[in-house]
Image (tube, helix red, strand yellow):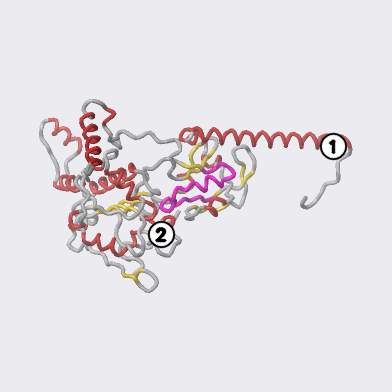
Amino acid sequence: MLGEGILKGLAETAKNFVGSFFSAERMTTVEYPEERIAPIEAARVFPFLVYDGIEWDAGLRCVACQICEKECPPKCIFIEKSKDKKPDAVGKPQFYPTRFDIDISVCMSCQICVEVCPFEAIKMDNVFELSTDDRFDGLLLDRKQLAKPNAYYHQIHPTEAAVVEARLAADRAKSDAKQTAAAIASAIKGAERPLPPPTTGGD
Amino acid sequence: MVDEGLKIELGKQGVFVTTIEELYNWGRKSSIWPMQFGLACCAIEMIATTMARYDLARFGAEVFRPSPRQADMMIISGTVTKKMAPQVVRLYNQMAEPKYVIAMGACAISGGPFKQGYNVLKGIDRYIPVDVHIPGCPPRPEALLQAFMTLQKKIEAQHLTGAGRPRHLDAEGQGEFPVPVQGEHDLEPTSNKGVWPLPVIIR
């Protein structure tokens, strides 16, 4: 019948209108600045850099391998690699980014940087309140603005963070076991015969 | 200028004190009618913002006017192709003062994912002055609401006299911007030097 759909739609609207006087569930509007829709766990906006420990500067997981910079489709990441190495959160000397800028005016939230990162150093944030009247400074985030603690990552993406944490722990256990095995092997070798002559150059 | 504390004190006694400037700006910021104009996928989020769930009407922007003559604000929601750019500038010229522009999403601010392409304008602020930029691809409806509040704060803070006064109160203020034309290879001119000064960022 002609107009059947319109009548059905209007009936639905009328139901919501009358129902809103009796039930809070029929009130569809979420009055944004005062109340918010709870963020979905997988929601993502822009990337951020994860750091371990307390100090953002010392604990950044990023080792400036620049894979994300190369893979970024709209090329919104800019990294400057350090010349020297400095110990990371577990004390292993690593390169670090002296500059890590993300131009959020270009970023398209595709998450490719997160997928290619071998160090679990870059993750997706869910902060969306970033509008500004400052076209240049306001939309270019540097590494200090991007750095956020691991605890924050666990807070916004609990499931994903737990998986990542388990993988990192397994990797660490594996490398620890390898190191111990190597240490034992060298100790046995050292006990069997006198010290080998010192080698020079590469391996 | 009336002291803020004194004003509250007088308010308690039933005396309402205001300034012309405050009243004027309150009127300006509370009835910003957007233009019904969408360019790409961000427009879907803009439409969602006006619907019952988010309800932009709560901020005094209820009616999307289909004519630039009746609109106060232009939400550049989406990719501005070089073919569309002259029309966008022309529509902006046709709007009556006071008029505001929100650049919504990566494409409108900078070209976003199409930045390296040949046929997309690298940011609408090359031709018209933009008041608020919303990064995101696309920004959430809440992000548009937040941008709207940012614009309202900006209007509120404006003085009606002096150097930073609104354009329509400035006798020499120019509300019309040159419309680019399709040249042989690109739009001509490639940018309006008056609104797009070369950025100098020192970090």
Number of the label disc, if any, that sits on residue A190: 1
Q: Is residue A108 left or right of residue B156?
A: right
Give me the residue at 40% from left, 72% from top.
B185
Residue type, numbered disc 1? Gly
Same chain letter for marks 2 and 1: no
Nearest the viewer among A44 and A76 is A44
Q: Is residue A100 magenta-colored? A: yes
Q: Is residue B45 magenta?
A: no
Judge left or right: residue B150 versus residue A94: left
Q: Residue at x 32, y 55 (%)?
A: B39
Q: Residues within 10 Å of mark 1 (few under 14, many from 20)?
A: few
- Local packing at callout 2 (Cα closer than 10 Å; few below 14, some 14-19, many 20+) is few
Looking at the picture, how far across and down is residue A200, in whole percent?
Answer: 80, 51
Residue A13 placement (x, y as % from top left): 23, 36
Vertical comparison of A27 with B151: above or below: above
- Please give the name of the residue rendered at 52% of the width and 45% of the height, measured from the top-left corner: A114
Label 2 belongs to which residue? B200
Which residues lie in the magenta part?
A98-122
- Which residue type carries mark 2? Val
**Measured from the top left, where is residue A197 in percent x and y?**
86, 46
Q: Are marks 2 and 1 in contact (CB under 8 Å)?
A: no
Determine the secondary structure under disc 2. loop
Secondary structure type for disc 1:
helix
User: In the depicted view, which residue is nearer to us: B99 or A55?
Assistant: B99
The CA span between labels 2 and 1 is 62 Å
